[in-house]
Image: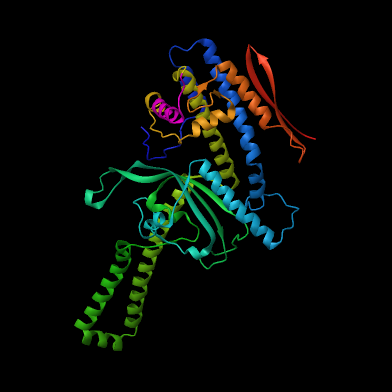
Amino acid sequence: MTGAGDCPHFIPLARGELTELLCAEEGLAAADRAAIRRLAALLAAYYHFEFDHRFRDLREAYFTFDPDTDNTTLLRLTADERQTRLNRLYKDLGALLERAHFRHLARDEIEPAIDHASDWGVRVDVDFSAFEYVAIFARGEGFQTRTRRRLRNLYQPEEVDVPVYRRLAIMLKLRDHPRLPGPVDTHNVLFKLFKDIPRLDVTMLLPGARVRFNIRDRGRIGLPVLSGLLMGIWNVLEHLTEFVEAVILSPNAVWALAAGSIGYGYKSFYGYLHMRQRYHLALTRSLYFQNLDSNAGVLTRLIDEAESQECIAALLGYFCLWRYAGPEGWTSDELDTVMDLYLDRYADLTVQCESGAGLRRLRSLGLVQGNGDRVRALAPDQALVAVHCAREKHFAVDPADGHATFAQVSRVDGGVSPSRVSERH
């Protein structure tokens, strides 16, 4: 079961699965099941248009700061204009992350990761002056079962619950800094999305992070050298007379001593390189297997997720209100409670729907009737017409840019079948 602490407002269901879950309920007539499926499709089309229109400017704004684009721009921005656009982009990206149910991690939530690391992470040193801007967002704080082996357990596999962020988004802009060797992109905004990141390993995902050895690692490197050096000094002092005579009589002894010292030094340096390579390999594995998307890909994924969340929440809210409220209707709080209970009972999901958001969605779509605190849902056939009307009203032609986005609705088997036409005049 998904705990409420994971991400209380996020509904981890696909629209198609939720639609089939609703239609599988006993007692529904075949006509009602067909109407619910058509309503789900129409809601998906409505929210697709809404989010495409709402975030169209955001996509174009990020294009200016996308490090992966191979297009050129005809815009010639002054430094002030560029900074203004950059500040607006930070704000809009943060708002989009909130719509996708991410939350911004405060400094005190990141600081524990600076001095610690999980058994699967790497302790790193981060110099935040290497960033002109950096913000970290997380969604879903849960636990993941992983297997580890330790000396105290004779390297037998043991399972432990590791606190993780289910999704972690990092938004940053670099500046020239000694920590960042080679050519550094200081003009664009990097946008990264990861999955299942242990909470103590957040900082290892930041560029310019340097590996920090713990006391055990330092001991593995330094103790052999120190013990060898002390043993050599002891042997020399213990047999000082013989050693001096050997050096006087045989100059090659000096070379043998130098070769031994160089050998110990090389062994120590090789151990350091091997351990650092092992840590970098662990970091590379985390970046490879836990990286979900980068830059414009993150933007597209987040818009799709926010769109999906709005759609399934509206569909679930309408179904619960229509199916269970009765002639007296429900208040907003009652609707939220029943939506939570429905997901808990039929989908085994502990979700706390956003307070008041369910009824606000239904009101904006015209799917409810009643002006007081208690409202009732429209019948499914009326709901189809209401969503279509809301869609036409919301996506009328914008005379400012001459862009027409509207729906053509045709009657197919007694139902409403949406299609979209998008053209530039």
Examine the image and state in which quarter residue 418 appears: top right
Q: Quadrant of the N terminus?
A: top left
Q: As drawn, is 227 to the left or to the right of 144?
A: left
Residue 242 rendering spot, x and y as whole percentages: 22, 85
The magenta stretch spans residue 334: yes
Residue 342 rendering spot, x and y as whole percentages: 41, 25
Question: What stretch of residues is rendered in magenta?
Answer: 328-342
Looking at the picture, the colour scheme in use is rainbow
* Furthest residue toward front: 372
By secondary structure, the bulk of the magenta-drawn segment is best described as helix
Residue 305 rendering spot, x and y as whole percentages: 53, 37
50 vs 252: above or below: above
157 vs 175: above or below: above
266 vs 420: above or below: below
The reply to whether residue 17 is visible in this rendering is no
The residue drawn where x is 55% and y is 17% is 380
* Furthest residue toward left: 238
The residue closer to the viewer here, 185 or 2, is 2
The magenta stretch spans residue 398: no
Examine the image and state in which quarter residue 293 appears: top right
The residue closer to the viewer here, 329 or 254, is 329
54 vs 361: above or below: below
